[in-house]
Amino acid sequence: MIEIVTDPFPSANDLNTLWQAAWGESAARDFAPVLARSLVHFGAYADRRLIGFVNVATDGDRHAILLDTCVHPEFQRQGVATRLVTMAADEAARRGAQWLHVDYEPQLDAFYRGCGFRPTAAGLMKLR
């Protein structure tokens, strides 16, 4: 059974383990400063193991940004990401956000459209 937890503040080790599995990202990161500024974040757990995650950042007013949606490959295509995104959108609205933005690569278009997002023009600048 998969349990979704609101604002679980997972350890850096748990998040880094998930990132490695989901994205192949091997550089360890400290997530505490990021999570401290989040509007809300959700963790998906299977037997106390972090297997999914999504974060919602905010401008402190009307806009929120969906970030870091990921699910461990062993648990993909089971609706976990959809549940995470849906819960994140609902809670962001409850916490005062009026708009939820997300950036994604073209192969994820069907997923995010299925979650209720509509495509818009956006810009991206790599800073480092």
Image (cartoon, rainbow, N blue to C red):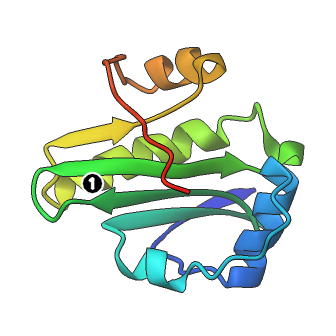
Q: Give the residue type that dot 1 points to.
A: Ala
**6 relative to 81 in the view: left or right:** left
Q: Position of residue 83 (x, y in %)?
A: 53, 42
Query: In the image, what residue occupies the spot 11% across and 51% down?
Result: 62
Instruction: Examine the rendered structure and indicate whether residue 50 appears above or below residue 68.
Output: below
Q: Position of residue 81 (x, y in %)?
A: 61, 41
Classify 10 Å Cα crowding around label 1: few (below 14), some (14-19), many (20 and above): many
Residue 79 in view (yes/no): yes
Query: In the image, what residue occupies the spot 30% across and 55% down?
Result: 91
Query: In the image, what residue occupies the spot 56% across and 14% down?
Result: 110
Q: Which residue is mark 1?
A: 92
Residue at the front extreme of this rendering: 128
Using the image as rendered, state which of residue 65 and residue 122 is in the foreground.
Answer: 122
Q: How many marks?
A: 1
Quadrant holding the N terminus: bottom right
Q: Position of residue 59 (x, y in %)?
A: 20, 60
Q: Position of residue 14 (x, y in %)?
A: 75, 76
Element type where label 1 sits in the image: helix
Query: Which of the 4 quarters of the picture holds residue 58?
Result: bottom left
Query: In the image, what residue occupies the spot 69% across and 82% down?
Result: 12
**77 relative to 118 in the view: left or right:** right
Using the image as rendered, state which of residue 35 and residue 83 is in the foreground.
Answer: 35
